[in-house]
Amino acid sequence: MIKEEKKEKVEDIKSVFESGSPIIFADHTGLKAENMFKIRNKLADADAYIKIVKNTLALLAAGQVHADMDLSQIFTGPTSMIVSGENIVISAKLVKEFVKEFDTFKVKGGIIENKIVGSEAIERLSSLPSREVLIAQLLGVMMNPAARLVTALSGVPGNLVAVLDAIRQQKEQAA
């Protein structure tokens, strides 16, 4: 690879780091081209993509953007960068599927919100419910006290009507 090509690749990788998008690093040792094609397609459906990088170039790019992070442990052996779109949870769930489906595919770690995270953090992310489910759960929790208040308040007029009806019946019997 000539020097200009290397500079372009470093700039390309650097732009990924600068974007601030969540990144999951994986070891793709022994993965066949047809399996990589499947992975690319599934990630594309989730607004994410995979980029196979040369470790030395990735370390150069990372050093320019994240000088305070030591990524040397991650950039050993074959390395893929899975760059997530808006929803890192969906990407993490897909990566978990890939690890189950392809024996040689392994998670090395990631960068989320400009912090290095280990493979166990990616695993925890993959076990979270989807954004829609979390919103529904939150709304349920928020609506529960309001629903109870409405139930309690609706009982007061009903009780008042019952008491007034009982008083009316007493007066009718007394008269």
Image (tube, helix red, strand yellow):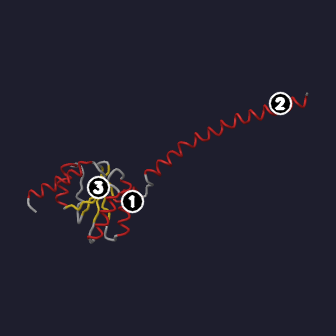
* Picture residue at 72% right of the left edge, 36% below the top: 158
Q: Secondary structure at mark 2?
A: helix
* Picture residue at 27% right of the left edge, 60% below the top: 50
Give the residue pinned by disc 3. Answer: 83
Label 3 vs label 2: CA separation?
A: 74 Å
Q: Is residue 118 left or right of residue 64?
A: right
Give the residue pinned by disc 2. Answer: 168
Give the residue pinned by disc 1. Answer: 93
Count of picture labels: 3
Query: How far across and down, in percent of the image, does residue 48 sit?
Result: 31, 56
Query: How far across and down, in percent of the image, does residue 96 sit?
Result: 37, 63
Asked whether 110 or 15 is in front, the reply is 15
Q: Quadrant for residue 102, please give it.
A: bottom left
Looking at marks 1 and 2 on the same chain, the residue that comes earlier in the sequence is marked by: 1
Q: Secondary structure at mark 3?
A: strand
Label 1 vs label 3: CA separation?
A: 13 Å
**Farthest residue, direction top:** 175
In the rendered view, tell whether residue 174 sits above or below residue 86.
above
